[in-house]
Amino acid sequence: MTQPGTPEAFPPVRKSVTVKAGQETAFYRFTREIGTWWPLASHSIGGKDAEGVAIEEKVGGRILERIRGGRECVWGTVTAWEPPRRVAFTWHPGHDPAQAQDVEVRFTAAGLATRVDLEHVGFERLGAQARMARRAYPMGWAYVLGRYARRRDLGMMLLSGLTAVLMAIQRLRGKSDAPTEKTA
């Protein structure tokens, strides 16, 4: 039970996907090639003006979104860089870094494929937005990992449409909350 005055702890979001690639290829596709598969149209700060996203490949490196007009927004900071087994980072796209959650992604060889396990924790740091974020991220990460794994089945198409609708609703709600945007 949570003590009075202590933020409510939320269970982690855990998602897994198996990709048809070796461990090293899977790791670098997730990190070095993130800009080729990340769904910027629905999962970015810049929306239609988002031009790309990249991960600086080192502890302390930034996850950085580039937006038309030269703006850059930091989504998080790399906290562990262990190719080809693990990458971890803080996560605060569109929010103050003090509200950052933690994401860890593990890559485990599985024959000719690789199992990719993602864990996202620390939602309580979002304060009043924590409950809504914790409800949205399971679907969001499923969609993002599906894009990463290049899944194109009917379920992914439906999830894509639903995710776009939910993200639009969240953006509309967020306009009244005015989250802090950090630029580099």
Image (cartoon, grey):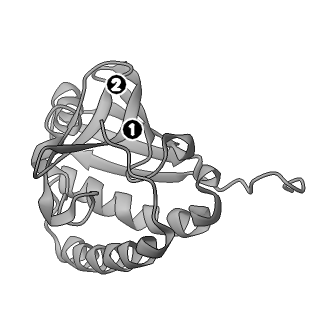
Q: Position of residue 19 (x, y in %)?
A: 21, 45
In the image: residue 95, left or right of residue 53: right
Viewer-nearest of labels 1 and 2?
1
In the picture provided, is 169 more to the left or to the right than 151?
right
Q: Position of residue 141 (x, y in %)?
A: 36, 57
CA–CA distance between discs 1 and 2? 20 Å
Three-letter amino acid code at the position of disc 1: Gly
Question: Which residue does the image show at 65% across and 56% down from the upper left?
Answer: 10
Q: Residue at x 41, y 44 (%)?
A: 118
* Along the line of sight, the residue nearer the viewer: 158 or 35: 35
The structure residue drawn at horizontal position 26% and vertical position 39%, both measured from the top left corner, is 64
Q: Which residue is pictured at 46% across the width and 60% down the height?
A: 179
| Residue 168 vertical position relative to residue 136 in the rendered view, above or below | below
Q: Which quadrant would the C terminus be assigned to in this image?
A: top left
Left or right: 57, with 152 as reference point: right
Q: Which mark is residue 85?
A: 2
Q: Amino acid at mark 2?
A: Arg
Q: Secondary structure at mark 1?
A: strand
**Secondary element type, mark 2:** loop
Q: Which mark is residue 76?
A: 1
Nearer to the camera, 39 or 159 = 39
Counting from the top left corner in percent of width and height, residue 60 is at 38, 21
Tell me if 8 is positioned left or right of 52 in this view. right
Q: Quadrant of the N terminus?
A: bottom right
Quadrant housing residue 173: bottom left
Q: Position of residue 140 (x, y in %)?
A: 36, 63
Return the residue found at the far right. Answer: 4
